[in-house]
Image (spheres, rainbow, N blue to C red):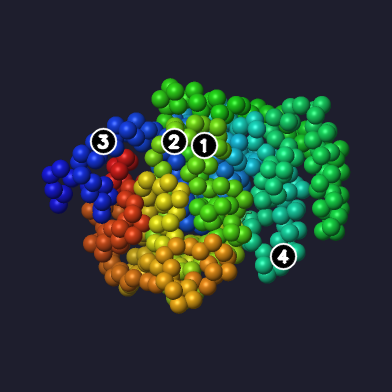
Amino acid sequence: MVSPGVQQYGFFFQLPADICRRLNPVRGALLVNNTVVIGIQWGDEGKGKIVDWLAEKSDVVVRFQGGNNAGHTLVLDGKVFKLSMLPSGIVRPGKLNVIGNGVVLDPWSLFAEIDSVIEQGIKVSPENLVIADNTPLVLPLHRELDILREQRAGSSKIGTTGRGIGPTYEDKVARRAVRVADLGNQGSLDSMIGRLLDHHNVLRAGYGAVPVDGSRLKTELLSIAGRLLEFAGPVWRILSERAEQGKSILFEGAQGSLLDIDHGTYPFVTSSSTVAGAAAAGTGIAPGRLGYILGVCKAYTTRVGSGPFPTELSDKVAHHLATVGHERGTVTGRARRCGWFDAVLAGQVCKLAGVDGLALTKLDVLDSLETLKICTGYRLDGNIVDRLPATADEQGRLEPIYETLPGWEGSVASSRSIGDMPENARNYVARIEQLTGRPVNIISTSPDRLDTAAVSGPFA
Ligand code: GDP
Ligand code: IMO
Ligand code: MG
């Protein structure tokens, strides 16, 4: 029961009503308008499902980082869409979908994806898809380099998706990337390719790979130029105009904050900035226009690829999470590693990624587990640690400290309201709020779009 003068803000949070009144006029106009959705674990939190659900009330859906290493799954009325490059708003008629400059774009993979969703009955044209003209391109040589490096690294490999994401970001920062608009300027394309291959062919020789032929690469690029350029535009200006018109823009993060190039479990990370601030740099929208920041997390934890994972399990609970949760990578089909919810990492990420509230997914996967554990701290060399240390070596030696909570009888699967859920499930959610310091605004209880409960905050 909420007392007068206090507003319920999530299950655990009760803010004094006068604070709510002061908060809302300040951020209220922006709160729902330009929501930024990010993953706060190691990716695959269910961002695609949440973005699709939120897209109903948005005008524009924007990807701002990552590339086709992402795999976002949408389930609409039993029909499954697996999107890698296309923003999740693409399945809803009348929405503008935008790929921002912070993304790295593999045009061949994009066209295959467009063709596949068109086959599934979705309309894709320059009317509902715009790509920033300054977006760097992922080329076949980037994919090859990604794979060559991983093969050479052997057991110390990162476990990348092999999509050429890292090598393309390297070329972007080294100022030798070919970008979308360059395909329309044949005059300078020769010199750009020359500059790119000066670097890559030396590198390839070191790996024993055959050199890339510049004129062949140019022919390949020109063969896709026409189709790609149809979608190209000044994204920074389009978003600025839409924002000024009061349109609602939804930013769709890829990967997760623990894979962030700066804040993640380096070097076992992806090569882009995955925190909310990247939405501004990765599109050209003013940072002050970014509204509510929604962090998506699973009710437990998963990770694909190598790297530290303090709460990883290998027992029958791991088997339960992997099988009931269908934990297999959307992009590469690899088995995802599974473990308990890590509140230390989630709480840390909420602070550094600027998360205002949480969307908790896959709560249904915990149905029928007798007891549940949440990591509330670590032991490292005999000391208690309450944050992720900066080195992979220390991260790899963390021993989780757990709190045990009772599981629940019955099921939360397909619940669309918090009132339908067993008390112990509600207590589990409330404990996550307490430990992370953020309200749970949305709870997802099945892959289906409609099995989503808005329980508090701006979406309720
Ligand atoms: P993303 O990369 O963050 O968009 O997540 P993925 O699509 O790679 O992985 C999430 C998986 O969980 C997908 O197969 C979703 O269909 C599924 N999923 C999302 N939310 C729920 C949920 O609440 N319950 C269950 N059982 N599955 C879910
Ligand atoms: P979504 O958007 C889960 C992981 C890879 C690898 C590391 C680096 O679906 O959540 P990369 O190919 O990016 O250089 O690989 O990052 N990774 C993801 N893991 N979900 C993703 O995307 C991922 N994108 C990259 O497994 O460990
Ligand atoms: Mg995914």
Lateral position of residue 459 relative to residue 185, left or right: left
User: Which of the two discs, 3 and 4, sits closer to the camera?
Assistant: 3
Marks 3 and 4 close (CB-CB < 8 Å): no
Q: Which mark is residue 290?
A: 2
Q: State yes or no: Cβ of the residue under disc 4 lies below 8 Å from any atom of ligand 2.
A: no
- Residue 231: quadrant of the picture: top right
Q: Are dots 1 and 2 in contact, CB under 8 Å?
A: yes
Specify the amino acid type for callout 3.
Arg
The C terminus, quarter of image: top left
At mark 3, the secondary structure is helix
Marks 1 and 4, Cα distance to the nearest angstrom? Answer: 34 Å
- Residue drawn at point x = 51 percent, y = 28 percent: 239
Residue 256 in picture, x, y percent from top left: 51, 52
How far is disc 1 from disc 3 in space, using C-alphas? 26 Å
* Frontmost residue, 341 versus 454: 341
How far across and down, in percent of the image, does residue 156 sit?
67, 67
For label 1, the SS is helix
Badge 3 crowding class, 10 Å Cα cut-off, few under 14, some 14 to 19, many 20 or more, is few
Camera-side mark, 1 or 4: 1
* Labelled disc at residue 22: 3
Q: Position of residue 361 (x, y in %)?
A: 40, 54
Task: Find numbered disc 2 in the image and state the secondary structure of the residue it sits on.
Answer: loop
The numbered disc on residue 280 is 1
Instruction: Identify the residue at the far left of this view.
Output: 4
Residue at coordinates 34% horizontally, 65% vertically from top-left?
367
Amino acid at pointer 4: Ala
In the rendered structure, the answer to whether residue 190 lies left or right of residue 139 reads right
Sequence-first disc among 3 and 4:
3
Q: Is residue 363 above or below residue 101?
A: below
Comparing 435 with 447, the one in front is: 435
